[in-house]
Amino acid sequence: MVEMAASVEPKRKEGPEPTPAPPAHLRDESLLKFVGTATIILGVVLLVSSSIAIAALSILRYTLVEWIPILPLSLLLIFVGGLVNVYFRKVIDHALNPKKAVDAPRAPYSYAYPYQMPPPYYAMRMPSPTYAPAPAVATPAPSVQRPAASMRFCIQCGKQIPVEAKFCPYCRHAYTN
């Protein structure tokens, strides 16, 4: 009886586990990755075959009008396939292998020589205390003092200098009277 129960039990295969299906948002990207590769291959095949056909037909003195448009078309296919391949490889790579969060680097410890003060450590940052806003006080506008008639302002530094000065004594800017 025990032998029959053991034979009825399903046997498991010891092979490798199947790879899981890609996430739903990556199925289109992986399809476009293969479409990009196929487009490049098709463009290269068209380029090589059309260049061989044009060379053979020109030797045999046939018309080449039908084969000439295939050359730029094949170059366009190679270009588009390359762009799709490069872009979607980056998209898939970033989606499957996201960048890990990097912790802030720790402050380095410095070496303290014997009989020396230990190095200071960074103080904890405390939140600044909040104060109630001060009441608005109406202050009279300060009166603007006019310089004496014998003074003027330097156009370089803005300080007051005598009218007859040839140079500003503060910034050494030259004046011509």
Image (cartoon, helix red, strand yellow):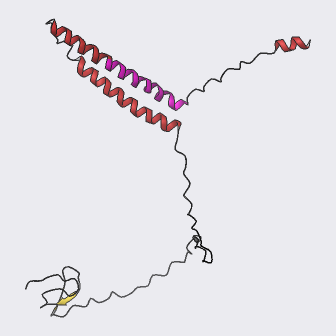
Compared to residue 72, the image places residue 100 above or below, namely below
Residue 96 visible in rendering: yes
Residue 39 part of the magenta segment: yes
Q: Residue 171: x percent and y percent? A: 22, 82
Name the foreground residue: 134 vs 117: 117
Please state the extent of the stretch shown in magenta in the rendering: 22-44
Residue at left 40%, top 24%? 37
Q: Residue 9: x percent and y percent? A: 81, 15
Q: How many marks?
A: 0
Q: Residue 167: x percent and y percent? A: 15, 86
Residue at left 50%, top 27%? 27
Compared to residue 107, the image places residue 143 above or below, namely below
Name the foreground residue: 18 vs 113: 113
Name the foreground residue: 116 vs 121: 116
Residue at left 44%, top 36%? 90
Name the foreground residue: 147 vs 57: 57
- 13 vs 116, left or right, is right
- 75 vs 177, left or right, is right
Residue 66 visible in rendering: no
Question: Within the image, what quadrant is residue 159 found in?
Answer: bottom left
**Secondary structure of the magenta portion, mostly?**
helix
For the N terminus, the quadrant is top right
Specify the farthest residue to the right.
1
Specify the farthest residue to the front.
114
- 54 vs 176, left or right, is right
- 76 vs 96, left or right, is left
